[in-house]
Amino acid sequence: MRILLADDDEQLQRALRITLAARGYEVLHARDGAEAIEQAASGHPDLILLDLGMPRVDGLDVIRAVRAWSSVPILVLSGRTDSGEKVEALDAGADDYVTKPFAMDELLARIRARSRRPAGEDDAGAVHRIGELEVDLAAKTIRRADGAGGTGGSTGAVRLTPTEWHLLELFLKHPGRLLTREMLLSEVWGPYHANDAGYLRLYVAQLRRKLEPVPAEPRHFLNEPGMGYRFEP
Amino acid sequence: MRILLADDDEQLQRALRITLAARGYEVLHARDGAEAIEQAASGHPDLILLDLGMPRVDGLDVIRAVRAWSSVPILVLSGRTDSGEKVEALDAGADDYVTKPFAMDELLARIRARSRRPAGEDDAGAVHRIGELEVDLAAKTIRRADGAGGTGGSTGAVRLTPTEWHLLELFLKHPGRLLTREMLLSEVWGPYHANDAGYLRLYVAQLRRKLEPVPAEPRHFLNEPGMGYRFEP
DNA sequence: GGCGGTCCTCACGGTTCCCTAACGCCCCGC
DNA sequence: GCGGGGCGTTAGGGAACCGTGAGGACCGCC
């Protein structure tokens, strides 16, 4: 469970970091709005604790920016008690709003409440199509569109490993776009392995074997020599 | 959008009803805890506004009772401001907690925030099926669907421990969906134990032993190596 | 105090997955 | 023709993961 803590108050920052770490959470950190948006994108947090009163970028804009592409729960911290700002923040896409000062155990309870619902449940329309297959990224299921399938089937049971899912997710989220080797590698295996192109060949081959009608003649997972791969629905 | 309003304060009740109706919400109504549970089951509300200080049945018990079979958002209203009750209510399954007196526009914003995420799978009834077994989450009972066991050996009565029920609830509420280790662990044992995968192996084994026709060859509680478990009805 | 039940710890095989290494192929430039 | 880089494919070892059993700590009940 990874939490992005976006707050410029040094003291509160430290207190929260210690408390959260003691509860077993992994804590990311941002000091201003721009950094918060950046971290929300690159750090893949499971929840965001956002202070509205940060410099550089207004807190509301941070909410809107994150909501433009992610549905990660956002819990707002603020010193303002008037209902106007609460309404604005909640309507911008925040999931909860806590006014400072707050009781730590209440904040923790609210974090638990927000993280209770499994991630991805909200992406209701997250069913992608690859030829004859229907892929549900949230449920992690793949079934044939023509009928029988799913996980317990006999013939067309398509199962993917964690790494394969990770890679497939990137392709599905950017259909038709060219994804560079470097981008794919650093996203799935971390920036440190951005040069091990062998991994990619291996796992793209796996995806093709499991998802392409004719693995030898790929129609969906295409290679652009020297550059990377492209997914065509 | 249907809201269940459970509050015994006549005045607040009327004010809320009018305001909500004016916003286009359909309003159900309950005056005490028992009625609230009943309405939550029969009225299929999309959201529950729950006053904790109602007669007959304690508000926390209402939350737990509803959560036993439904995942409808619950927004608690209360006059108590101490964090203790907030934590109890949130951990019992409430999604939000507002202390009276509150600003009406804030409450409305919180309602919007709760109802923004499409309500999960509509659990039409409290009775789930697992192969030959019928599970009633509300009554906490399990019985065979094919009548009483004719053979003298099997008792027919399946008993589960509290932890086993907790885990089973999660599975039944998300059929066909992959539930990550982390999600299951942090939900049943708390975020602090999100890494103790040993617990899961143990209790999934228990569920299989008690619920699977052939525990050695699970057909309903499936493992996806490296990710988590999936329940297939 | 004895006892049954529940929860957790620990340890041991079996399975799955990830990564490493190697080989053949195609395309391209020389 | 020839060499090289990038790509696709296959096989195998090590590590992480999973299923299972035995046993101890704790609690409520008789």
Image (tube, coloured by chain):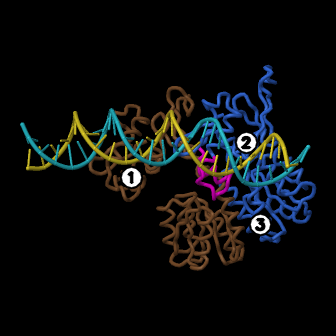
Chain colours: A brown, B blue, C yellow, D cyan
Q: Position of residue B188 (x, y in %)?
A: 68, 51
Quarter of the image for residue A219 reads: top left
Q: Chain of mark 3?
A: B
Determine the main secondary structure of the stretch shown in magenta: helix
Is label 3 or label 1 in front? Answer: 1
Which residue is at a point 89% across and 50% down the rendered structure image?
B35
Please check whether the numbered discs 1 and 2 fall on a single chain: no
Quarter of the image for residue A47 reads: bottom right
Q: Position of residue A175 (x, y in %)?
A: 43, 48
Q: Are marks 3 and 2 in contact (CB under 8 Å)?
A: no
At label 3, counting other C-alpha atoms closer than 10 Å, the crowd grade (few under 14, some 14-19, many 20 or more) is some
Q: CA distance from mark 3 to mark 2?
A: 27 Å
Question: Is B81 positioned to the left or the right of A220 in the image?
Answer: right
- In this rendering, the answer to whether A3 lies above or below B154 is below
Label 3 SS = strand
Q: Which residue is mark 3?
A: B98
- In this rendering, the answer to whether A225 lies above or below A62 is above
Mark number displayed over residue B123: 2
Which residue is at a point 53% across and 34% down the rendered structure image?
A143
Task: Indicate whether residue B194 is drawn in magenta.
Answer: yes
Quadrant in which the C terminus of chain A is drawn: top left
